[in-house]
Amino acid sequence: MNIAYLDLGKTHESIKEELDRVYRDIMERQWFIHGEWCGRFEREFAAYCGVANCIGVGNGLDAIRLILQAMDIGAGDEVIVPANTFIATVLAVTYVGASPVFVDADPHTYNLDLKKVEEKITSRTKAVIAVHLYGQIVNMEALWALQRKYGFRLIEDAAQSHGAIYKDKKAGTLSDAAAFSFYPGKNLGALGDGGAVVTNDAAVAERVRALSNYGSREKYVHLYKGCNSRLDEIQAGFLSKKLPFLDSWNEQRRRIAAKYCNQIKNQNIRLPEWNGEASHVFHIFPVMCKRRDILVPYLAERGIGTNIHYPTPIYMQGAYQECSSLSGSYPVTEKICAQEVSLPLYPGLADEEVEYVIECLNEFKL
């Protein structure tokens, strides 16, 4: 049996006619930027999340960067970020000239260790970015308490958590502003790059919309030194057609995750901790293995695709050589980077395929 780590074809085949109709409609209109489909998707996604404003942008990295710019965060400011995240979170901070301040991962959730955030707050702290990593929402109550105490801006990097629910609120509504990515492999993915900023802050929304359009609200009138980061019509149309299926797709993800959690019984495999609630949408199903170098080829030999999120901490990457002295400072993050293996999990993954993955993992020996 051959099981791909991710097979988007299974998802797209079920809605192929809808996607084809969107393409034909846009080709007939010949309007490709900031047209009817983009406006429609922005309204639909804002309503889905439960916020007043949604601005479609070019990608998830731009979404975070534009939020920071709209909040006037830049040179001389500090932004607290998780040490365990994709590099885009940190790139956005350095792109605006601010300094990232890393906090180690929680050993249970792999998200930001909330017990260690307060000790990193200084007079220069202007924001905390809460990354809902792997699809699991951060314990936001703890961050809300710190925000009330210190007054920083709170931002969600919700690139992996479309549709996750925390205390009856969806990801994206738990902060001052949130960034989403619609990279094809996301729970709600385009057929190319795309992203969005969602917020209830009208001032932030206005600035993000202008900044993403060359700093302009009116053609040839430029208020800010902006950029070109816009969600194009075709991607917006595809996303609009996929959005109604997001909740059912997330439920499929949780069903598969429950099987993995309940049926994988191998002391060499550490499963993610999950309370069964909808605060997790399992964009990724991460397991830990001390001998990943043996586990990955073992699964590959049996036709099972895997991935690794993420093999090298950001502060140990060549792009951040100025942070190289931090090596060894975040032991939980470094342990995750050394041991994490992502298993196949996506809508359309058949029961027999899930059972085969479980069987192979239960037979794995060191």
Image (spheres, grey):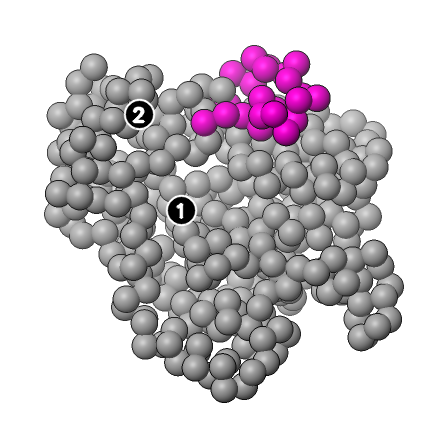
Can residue 306 be seen here?
yes
The location of residue 228, given as percent across then percent down, is: 70, 60
Residue drawn at 30 percent across, 36 percent down = 306
Can residue 151 be seen here?
no
Residue 328 counted in the magenta span = yes
The location of residue 25, given as percent across then percent down, is: 46, 83
Highlighted range, magenta: 311-333
Where, by quadrant of the figure, is residue 194 drawn? bottom right
Tell me whether circle 1 and circle 2 mark residues in contact (CB < 8 Å).
no
**Which residue reaches farthest bottom?**
28
Q: Which residue is mark 2?
A: 270
Q: Nearer the viewer, residue 252 or 14?
A: 14
Quarter holding the C terminus? top left
Q: Dot 1, crowdedness within 10 Å: few (<14), some or many (≥20)? A: many
Q: Which mark is residue 318?
A: none
The location of residue 303, given as percent across then percent down, is: 18, 38
Q: Dot 2, crowdedness within 10 Å: few (<14), some or many (≥20)? A: some
Q: Is residue 48 left or right of residue 356?
A: right
- Label 1 vs label 2, nearer the camera: 1
Where, by quadrant of the figure, is residue 241 drawn? bottom left
Residue drawn at 54 percent across, 86 percent down = 29
Q: What is the magenta segment's predominant secondary structure?
A: helix
Q: Nearer the viewer, residue 66 or 269?
A: 66
Question: Looking at numbered disc 2 in the image, what kind of residue is underneath it?
Answer: Arg
Q: Which mark is residue 283?
A: 1
